[in-house]
């Protein structure tokens, strides 16, 4: 019973944590550990403790670097070992803690640059293979490797494919599928324009088919919302719901599909949003990686 309760506590705490995705950090212009230390939301359980551990580990990383650069390797590696202990404590609670994972890689890189560079390709290959299996841990590892070596040949394309494999990005449809999708959208739009409610279910079926061919079609998403509103449902999110929707999308991109699903289910409890095409599309993307 005690072990079971402990496991439940760890699981709840892990699901309550989120950090910005690699792309967000790069757009902010600072992929450094210092920027990572600010990524823990103050609302997360054990925020103060994990922030302290991360700050201490970062300080020891910087102190160890100074020892290494001045030729005192043994002292530097001893301090690195203490930093790793703190990072393990963080990851015991938050196994996918991205900042801790990135700092671990920086410790490896500083301790033995030659060995790290030799192992980089192997780690990258393992992370890519993991994202093909929709592994959140592998996705985190891949983003961290990209943060350490953003100029690695083909890294941008590797990240883009990983986002597709993780269900965070739609794959590009083939030209024939695009053309057929446009035909279906045009037909559904004409049915809606005729104001014949008896034809609206047919139009909705056509739009759904169009979206299956081209999931990223904004025209189809807007048209589907219009049809569902005409059929008695609502697809428009108010400001608070839109904020929650964006939180769910960020959680999915960060490799936290269970957090995204929890936010989504809260939104769907509101009768106004039970027919929202955007929420249904998000559910499909989440379920594809669970």
Image: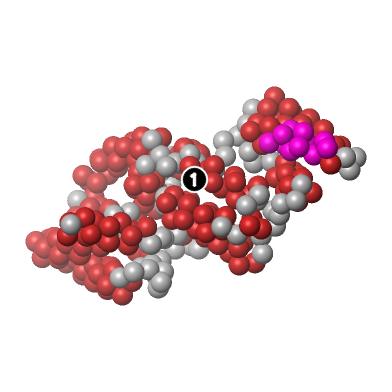
Residue 207 lies within the magenta run: yes
Percent of width and height locating residue 175:
68, 27
Q: Is residue 268 above or below residue 129?
A: below
* Numbered disc 1: secondary structure: helix
Q: Which residue matches tag 1?
A: 286
Name which residue lies at 63% across and 38% down: 215
Percent of width and height locating residue 161:
48, 38
Would residue 78 appear left or right of 6 to someone viewing this image?
left
Name which residue lies at 38% across and 35% down: 133
Quadrant housing the C terminus: top left
Quadrant housing the N terminus: bottom left
| Residue 107 visible to the viewer | no
Name which residue lies at 69% across and 41% down: 217
Magenta segment, which residues?
198-208
Classified by dominant secondary structure, the portion drawn in magenta counts as helix
Q: Residue furthest left?
A: 74
Q: Residue furthest right?
A: 194
Percent of width and height locating residue 179:
74, 28
Front one among 243 and 166: 243
Front one among 134 and 37: 134
Q: Residues within 10 Å of mark 1 (few under 14, many from 20)?
A: many
Q: Is residue 1 above or below residue 172?
A: below
Judging from the image, the colouring scheme is secondary structure
| Residue 277 visible to the viewer | yes
Residue 105 lies within the magenta run: no
Front one among 5 and 158: 5
Name which residue lies at 50% across and 58% down: 263
């Amino acid at each position: 019973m005690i072990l079971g309760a402990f496991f439940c506590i760890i699981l709840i705490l892990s699901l309550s944590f989120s950090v910005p995705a690699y792309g967000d950090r790069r757009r902010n212009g600072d992929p450094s550990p210092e920027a990572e230390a600010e990524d823990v939301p103050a609302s997360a359980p054990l925020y103060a403790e994990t922030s302290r551990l991360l700050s201490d580990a970062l300080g020891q990383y910087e102190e160890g670097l100074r020892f290494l650069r001045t030729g005192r390797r043994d002292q530097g590696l001893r301090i690195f070992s203490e930093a790793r202990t703190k990072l393990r404590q963080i990851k015991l609670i938050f196994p996918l803690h991205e900042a801790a994972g990135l700092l671990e890689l920086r410790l490896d890189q500083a301790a033995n640059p030659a060995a790290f560079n030799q192992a980089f390709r192997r780690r990258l290959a393992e992370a890519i293979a993991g994202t093909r299996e929709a592994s959140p841990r592998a996705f985190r590892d891949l983003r961290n490797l990209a943060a350490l070596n953003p100029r690695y040949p083909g890294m941008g394309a590797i990240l883009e494919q990983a986002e597709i494999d993780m269900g965070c990005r739609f794959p590009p449809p083939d030209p024939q599928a695009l053309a057929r999708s446009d035909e279906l959208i045009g037909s559904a739009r004409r049915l809606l324009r005729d104001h014949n409610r008896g034809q609206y279910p047919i139009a909705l079926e056509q739009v759904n088919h169009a979206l299956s061919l081209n999931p990223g079609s904004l025209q189809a998403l807007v048209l589907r919302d219009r049809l569902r509103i005409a059929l008695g449902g609502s697809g428009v999110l108010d400001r608070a719901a839109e904020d929650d929707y964006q939180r769910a999308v960020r959680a999915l991109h960060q490799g936290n599909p269970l957090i995204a699903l929890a936010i989504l289910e809260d939104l769907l409890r509101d009768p106004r949003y039970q027919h929202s095409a955007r929420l249904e599309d998000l559910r499909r993307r989440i379920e594809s990686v669970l």
